[in-house]
Image (cartoon, rainbow, N blue to C red):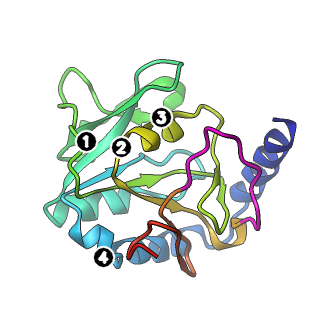
């Protein structure tokens, strides 16, 4: 979809220039851990941030210190299959494809996703309906369509879009968290 590609490029450039990034990342962490979905979750499935993405290392470390099971993604193939593997520390990660940190699948154990789980979903942008502009691989859409974990999209407030063009396979998140607000989408935190 040509419109999505152009939007993806523009949003990536805008995100690369985010001002006060570390302050905004900290605000997003505070908003995530204040969610009742986070509080009630037995497991937190979280991407490992890369380049100008919202820093998720603080979320991962906080979830570990809160005694939650933490798992990070491993992309199994180029067809969009992804699994999550348990970690007990960020030091267990290794550098994978494209320089992205990932679990060592020979050391870390694959997670069978418990019912009370949240998944932290990356994206360049989200809209108020929970749809996102990701990176075009479809990994998270496939995973979300097969699992019942509560999904939380992270986004800088200035990158929220009014309406993101969608396709049939796109799966919206339940909640969008920014540095300034929390948007509860249908099926979100309190079933709103």
Q: Nearer the viewer, mark 2 or mark 4?
A: 2
Q: Nearer the viewer, mark 1 or mark 2?
A: 2
In the rendered view, does 109 fall on the left or right side of 75?
A: left
Mark 3–mark 2 distance (CA, rounded to whole Å) = 24 Å
Percent from the top left, x then y, of residue 130? 59, 61
The secondary structure that most of the magenta stretch takes on is loop
Residue 100 is labelled as: 3
Q: Is residue 111 above or below residue 186?
A: above
Percent from the top left, x then y, of residue 119? 38, 53
Percent from the top left, x then y, of residue 81? 44, 25
Mark 1–mark 3 distance (CA, rounded to whole Å) = 14 Å
| Label 2 CA crowd tier, 10 Å (few <14, some 14–19, many 20+) | some
Q: How many marks?
A: 4
Q: Nearer the viewer, mark 3 or mark 4?
A: 4
Q: Which residues are the magenta region?
A: 161-172
In the rendered view, does 148 fall on the left or right side of 13?
A: left
Q: Earlier in the sequence, mark 3 or mark 2?
A: 3
Asked if the magenta segment contains residue 128, the reply would be no
Residue 91 is labelled as: 1
| Label 4 CA crowd tier, 10 Å (few <14, some 14–19, many 20+) | few
Q: Nearer the viewer, mark 3 or mark 2?
A: 2
Percent from the top left, x then y, of residue 91? 25, 42
Residue tagged by mark 2?
A: 147
Residue 36 is labelled as: 4
């Amino acid at each position: 979809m040509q419109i999505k590609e152009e939007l993806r490029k523009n949003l990536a450039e805008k995100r690369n220039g985010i001002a006060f990034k570390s302050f905004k990342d900290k605000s997003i962490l505070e908003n995530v851990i204040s969610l009742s979905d986070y509080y009630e979750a037995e497991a937190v499935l979280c991407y490992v941030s890369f380049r100008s993405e919202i820093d998720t290392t603080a979320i991962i470390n906080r979830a570990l210190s809160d005694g939650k099971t933490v798992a990070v993604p491993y992309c199994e193939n180029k067809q969009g299959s992804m699994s999550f593997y348990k970690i007990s520390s960020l030091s267990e990660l290794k550098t994978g494809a494209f320089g992205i940190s990932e679990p060592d699948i020979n050391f870390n154990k694959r997670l069978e996703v418990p019912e009370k789980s949240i998944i932290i979903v990356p994206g360049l942008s989200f809209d108020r309906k929970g749809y996102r502009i990701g990176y075009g691989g479809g990994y998270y859409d496939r995973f979300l369509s097969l699992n019942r974990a509560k999904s939380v999209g992270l986004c800088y407030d200035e990158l929220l879009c009014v309406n993101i063009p969608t396709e049939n396979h796109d799966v919206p998140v339940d909640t969008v968290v920014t540095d300034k607000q929390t948007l509860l989408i249908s099926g979100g935190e309190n079933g709103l």
